[in-house]
Image: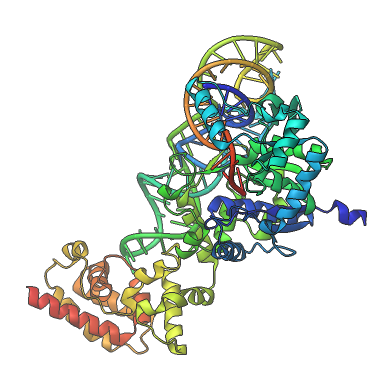
RNA sequence: GGCGCGUUCGUCUAGGGGUCUAGGACGCCGGCCUCUCACGCCGGUAACACGGGUUCGAUUCCCGUACGCGCUACCA
């Protein structure tokens, strides 16, 4: 029983007003890992009280993103919008106990006061007009049905807490506004809902972005006013773009979905994100999930913001890609097959694709790159790389070499690597040139390019028919252009 | 502007009074391998923001300055 009570419960609480942001994904990941590490539970709460900007599609997208990353949650996600009456009830308690009060100041009036303060270079804070309203006047206004908000009454002199990541955070009570708990339209505000919901969900550790640091003292005040035990707070440093500004559209991809579409593996994103702001304390970087979980510790999180380095993400994806089996990569390639002109995937065609993957996997970092890198395995070259042509096709006797090459290759049976290599090296020797003198021109003929996997391997995969056809085609091209 | 927080190679970071000639990784540069390109391997480049303290001794502790970021909403 007590064991159950002491169990760690963490949550990820996105607001469905956009796609799952890379920063949100990391927050979710850290919560998930922490729950796993501690044998606790990872819960979800959808903060959809901003009715105008929230949508069910966004909720679905966010859940999909979490699933893709492998971050499974327990219990049903809590929808904040369905808890409004509970939030209001909680505030009623505060009003009754005198910790919250109705404020009748109009938004226009407050806006005006704020402008004045800004003009005079003073910092604005709610002046407490309605805090000091006489009970009679307040009752009268209420009776008249004057529109009002409910504000929290800040009494404390100083609030401080020890953050799990940052140093001790202290703020003077005079710096905290009598913040609004319930809007004019009856909707509760963030600082209130987050406290009520976290309490009701039994959240023990709040792990969230550092942009919430300054909200924390307000929330602590609410916990105190409600007489609730506050959770442990740990704030994650922000993820910045290369210009040190908060990661945004200007930096390119910011949503998890975009990285998925670009061909990054979930394990890469997970691993890379885990390393943004956290380190296992030793030199390990490429780590499995279970390694991540066992090495994870809140104390390993650094407090300074981190710049998102896409180059390193790409490098890491290359590591994971090379570790994958050809079979798995072929699976990943299915959505792209039609770009190679493969309509329905027969067994033999898949065998061919697998061979192509074998040759290319050390040369790409993301799955979709196979498409471009491997086009010549599926279509005869229609153009020849001009730079390579200039370098290797300008030699004399090339057409004669190609003719001899075709002749020799046609005789090879079986058409395997050893046989091909022997033939080509023999041919070169016979002509008193290096093998490279034949290999490079042949590569252009076969692939259209100046670079490719080893040419003997390429020939084997292409097969004798394609090889011979392409060499003849090049021969034709050469004789016409000379 | 006010308040809060932060500051180790270009980037992610290790280290937290002497063992630091500050370690690793990405990137970049060079080399090896080699038919090219990759992969792999080897090597190199590059940092404790600045100024004061405390101390026998500060990258490590304290204060200040600079810079950065966050918050400053009837958004979350």
Residue A440 appears in the rendering: yes
Q: Is residue A240 shown above or below A175?
A: below
| Colour scheme employed for the rendering of this structure | rainbow
Image location (x, y in percent) of residue A106 = 58, 36
Q: Quadrant of the N terminus of chain A?
A: bottom right
Image location (x, y in percent) of residue A171 = 69, 27
Q: Is residue A27 shown above or below A265?
A: above
Q: Residue at x 77, y 31 (%)?
A: A136
Q: Nearer the viewer, residue A225 or A404?
A: A225
Report the residue that reaches farthest toward the right. Answer: A1
Q: Is residue A373 left or right of residue B40?
A: left
Q: Residue at x 73, y 50 (%)?
A: A87
Q: Residue at x 42, y 86 (%)?
A: A349
What number of labels is visible? 0
Q: Nearer the viewer, residue A450 or B76?
A: B76
Q: Quadrant of the C terminus of chain A?
A: bottom left
Q: Residue at x 65, y 36 (%)?
A: A104
Image location (x, y in percent) of residue A211 = 59, 40
Residue A195 occupies quadrant: top right
Q: Nearer the viewer, residue A344 or A115?
A: A115
Image location (x, y in percent) of residue A53 = 53, 55
Residue A281 occupies quadrant: top right
Residue A281 appears in the rendering: no
Report the residue that reaches farthest toward the left. Answer: A482
Q: Is residue B68 left or right of residue A137?
A: left
């Amino acid at each position: 029983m007590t064991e159950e009570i002491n169990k760690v419960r963490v949550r990820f609480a996105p607001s469905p007003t956009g796609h799952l942001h890379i920063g949100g994904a990391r927050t979710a990941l850290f919560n998930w890992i922490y729950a796993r590490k501690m044998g606790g539970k990872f819960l979800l709460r959808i903060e959809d009280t901003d009715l105008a900007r929230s949508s069910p599609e966004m909720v679905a997208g966010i859940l999909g993103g979490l699933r893709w990353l492998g971050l499974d949650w327990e219990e049903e996600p809590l929808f904040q919008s369905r808890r409004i009456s509970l939030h209001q009830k909680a505030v009623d308690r505060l009003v009754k106990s005198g910790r919250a009060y109705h404020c009748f100041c109009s938004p226009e009036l407050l806006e005006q006061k704020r402008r004045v303060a800004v003009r005079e270079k003073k910092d604005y804070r709610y002046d407490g007009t309605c805090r000091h309203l006489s009970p009679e006047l307040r009752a009268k206004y209420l009776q008249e049905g004057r529109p009002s908000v409910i504000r929290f009454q800040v009494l404390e002199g100083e609030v401080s807490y020890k953050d799990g990541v940052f140093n001790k955070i202290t703020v003077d009570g005079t710096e905290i506004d009598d913040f609004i708990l319930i809007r004019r339209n009856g909707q509760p505000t963030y600082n209130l809902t987050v406290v009520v919901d976290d309490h009701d969900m039994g959240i023990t550790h709040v792990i969230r972005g550092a942009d919430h640091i300054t909200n924390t003292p307000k929330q602590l005040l609410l916990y105190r006013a409600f007489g609730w035990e506050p959770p442990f707070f740990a704030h994650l440093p922000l993820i910045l773009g290369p210009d040190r500004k908060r990661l945004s559209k200007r930096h390119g991809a910011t949503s998890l979905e975009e990285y998925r579409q670009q061909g990054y593996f979930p394990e890469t994103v997970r691993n890379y994100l885990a390393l943004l702001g956290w380190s296992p304390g030793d030199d390990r970087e490429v780590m499995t999930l279970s390694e991540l979980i066992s090495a994870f510790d809140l104390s390993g999180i650094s407090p300074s913001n981190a710049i998102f380095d896409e180059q390193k993400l790409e490098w890491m994806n290359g590591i994971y890609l090379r570790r994958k089996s050809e079979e798995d990569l072929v699976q990943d390639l299915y959505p792209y097959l039609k770009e190679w002109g493969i309509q329905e995937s027969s067994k033999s065609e898949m065998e061919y694709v697998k061979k192509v993957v074998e040759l290319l996997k050390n040369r790409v970092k993301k799955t979709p790159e196979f498409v471009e890198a491997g086009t010549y395995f599926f279509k005869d070259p229609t153009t020849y790389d001009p730079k390579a042509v200039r370098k290797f096709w300008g030699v004399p006797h090339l057409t004669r070499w190609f003719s001899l090459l075709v002749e020799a290759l046609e005789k090879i049976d079986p058409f395997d690597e050893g046989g091909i290599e022997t033939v080509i090296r023999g041919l070169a020797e016979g002509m008193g040139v290096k093998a490279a003198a034949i290999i490079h021109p042949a590569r252009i003929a076969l692939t259209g390019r100046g670079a490719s996997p080893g040419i003997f391997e390429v020939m084997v995969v292409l097969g004798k028919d394609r090889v011979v056809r392409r060499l003849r085609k090049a021969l034709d091209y050469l004789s016409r252009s000379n």
